[in-house]
Amino acid sequence: MSAVRARGTTAARRADPLLFGTVAFLSSELMFFGGLFAAYFTLRAVSAVWPPADVNLEVLEPAIATALLVISSFTMQGALHRARAGDLDGMRRWVGVTMLLGVLFLSSQVRTWLAADFGVSSNAYGTMFYGMTGFHALHVTAGIVLMLVVLGRTAQGAYRDGRLSGLEAVTYYWHFVDVVWIALFATIYLIK
């Protein structure tokens, strides 16, 4: 494309390949979690009692963990905002806070698993509960690893030139993880 454009024309914007790939990947992940939700609601529909009478889940701690995860979406967006403003130190701080909130969420999830009075093989509910929350926990863990990559790249001088697609991709991913958890929390703890 020529540096000089004809008067009255606009340059076509090309989608960033990394961001396009991230959206395509998240679309496939949406289908994966959609399948889990479909299995859950199908089992719920054909079961006489759902969840089984012997299943007792505490709601308060997972609700607090959910709030922490939702807050982490805002802190991750804050990191992106700071990076766009050229404040890479601020970006690193907000990514660090987001990682801490993610680790607290995972810690709560592990505690919930250990405190549960049923297992993955106890019944269909247990299989779905551990499958859905387990796959989500793997996604949260992957998000934390991606944030470590962002911090490592920042230490190597990345993002100083204003190209933030890597950080934006991680931010999209983290928002996705948060939205999926809100749906999981509502399904498992509120709707039952």
Image: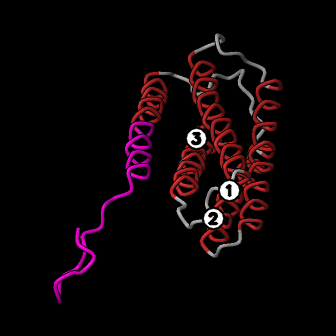
Percent position (x, y) of residue 21?
Answer: 39, 45
> Looking at the image, do the residues carrying marks 3 and 2 touch, with CB atoms under 8 Å apart?
no
Magenta segment range? 1-30
What's the amino acid at mark 2? Answer: Arg
Percent position (x, y) of residue 44?
Answer: 49, 28
Q: Residue at x 68, y 38 (%)?
A: 145
What's the amino acid at mark 1? Answer: Gly
Q: Which residue is mark 3?
A: 184
- Residue 129 is left or right of residue 7, and the answer is right
> Looking at the image, do the residues carrying marks 1 and 3 touch, with CB atoms under 8 Å apart?
no
Q: Residue furthest front?
A: 3
Is residue 63 inside the magenta stretch? Answer: no
Mark 3 nearby-residue class (10 Å; few <14, some 14–19, many ≥20): many
Nearer to us: label 1 or label 3: 1
Is residue 11 inside the magenta stretch? Answer: yes
Element under disc 3: helix
In primary-sequence order, the first of circles 3 and 2 is 2
Mark 1 nearby-residue class (10 Å; few <14, some 14–19, many ≥20): few
